[in-house]
Amino acid sequence: MVTAKLSISYDKRTIIPEIVRVRCRAGRDEVTIRMVTGQIPDDFAKASERLAHTFGVRQAKAMPGPTYATVTVVLMRGDTLHDVIGPLPVPYLPDFTALPIGVQEDGDLNRLRLFGTQVLIVGATGSGKGSVIWSIVRALAGGVLTGVVELWGLDPKGGMELGIGRPMFARFASRDFAEMAALIEQAAAKAQERAARLAGQTRQHEPTPEEPLIVLVIDELANLTAYLTERQLKDRIKAALGIVLTQGRAVGVHVVAAIQDPRKEVLPARGLFPTRIGLRLSEPAEVDMVLGDGMRDRGALCDRIPQTQPGVGYVVLEGDPTPMRVRLTYCDDDAVREMAYLYGEPAGGAA
């Protein structure tokens, strides 16, 4: 505690935090510590890297303990996410509050709440953004088959990522930026129409085959918001996207978007994505940009994820201030083709 700068000097005495309890679990130890008066859990979070090296573990994470005066430091000894996670079974009726998309470091399934949110996936080249996209699409595939979900695909890279699963998408655009702008504008109009119709009746749209949940899946959003050179098209996309992000959550029009660069100048609407998944990032400062202030200190070491572990990232779970390390499932090309064949439209989706 002294060398990690977690002791307090007071009245010529050195006061040291006390161990309350130690629990040993598979791959990790949980140490509950009674803090010195005046300390907070964030003090331990900021020293987490020192503690990890001290105890010779892969990572240390600090979180609030069972009482206000305690903190729990989790010492991760092994790596439960080392191996690739294969595709998960497709639920016949998707639970939009808990879509299974991967595995958490604690061994539980990682479940995504889609209702009431918009999802942003951020990661460097080769970090596994495609794994996240296809994990979400796979979790929604049963809804596509039964008609309660409509996927709209936008792939500015000419269809290189989403094209292989094109039969899954009710609408699809990959080469014409004007068509992509029109598609986002249609989603914005749908969100506004539903909002006007449902106002005063319900606070959350319930998907049906007549009124399906619409999910815009956008690969490399920066190509539409920052790198597009045609000013008029860019302004149309930004305006329509802003409407979808602000008004679509409650009326069943959602966005799942992937991007490499999380800076505000690249994605001005970054703050309109309540749910963010941080994969491997290039710089430590980018972690807090993606997941929120202080998240790197709390253990979200996105900049330390090896290039050999695509699909590994960090998420912030609802009600938990400590980021969770997860690994998203990996669907190879054959798995995507099979999914598109079983759950998509035989005609191959809209042009």
Image (tube, rainbow, N blue to C red):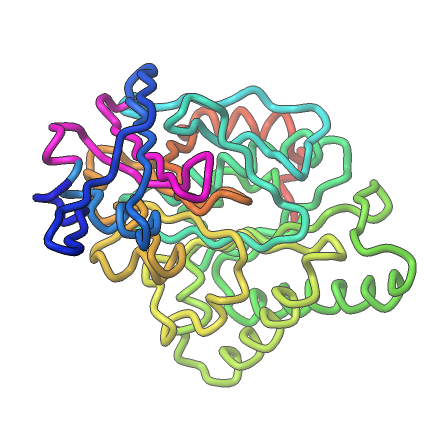
Q: Is 92 situated above or below 175?
A: above
Report if residue 112 lies within the magenta region: no
- The answer to whether residue 146 is above or below residue 302 is above
**Across the whole image, how many numbered discs are drawn on residues?**
0
Q: Look at 78% across and 46% down and name the residue there.
A: 212
In the image, the segment drawn in magenta is 52-79
Left or right: where 49 falls relative to 263: left
Q: Which residue is rendered at x = 34% and y = 51% of the image?
A: 40
The x, y position of residue 226, in whole percent, is: 39, 73
For residue 60: magenta? Answer: yes
Counting from the top left corner in percent of width and height, residue 264 is at: 38, 73
Q: Which residue is depicted at the point 53% across and 24% down?
A: 338
For the residue pair 36 and 290, the one nearer the viewer reads as: 36
Residue 188 lies in what quarter of the image?
bottom right
Relative height, residue 50 to residue 105 (above, below) = below
Residue closer to the observer: 238 or 9: 9
Q: Is residue 240 visible?
A: yes
- Percent across and percent down for residue 115 are 67, 47
- The residue most toward the bottom is 231
The N terminus sits in image quarter: top left
Q: Nearer the viewer, residue 265 or 174?
A: 265
* Residue at 54 percent of width and 44 percent of height: 319
Percent from the top left, x then y, of residue 135? 49, 34
Could one spot residue 130 in this view of the protein? no
In which quadrant of the rendered view does residue 156 lie? bottom left
Between residue 107 and residue 65, name the one nearer to us. Answer: 65
Which residue, as the protein is rendered here, is positioned at the far front? 11
Residue 300 shown left or right of residue 53 in the figure? right
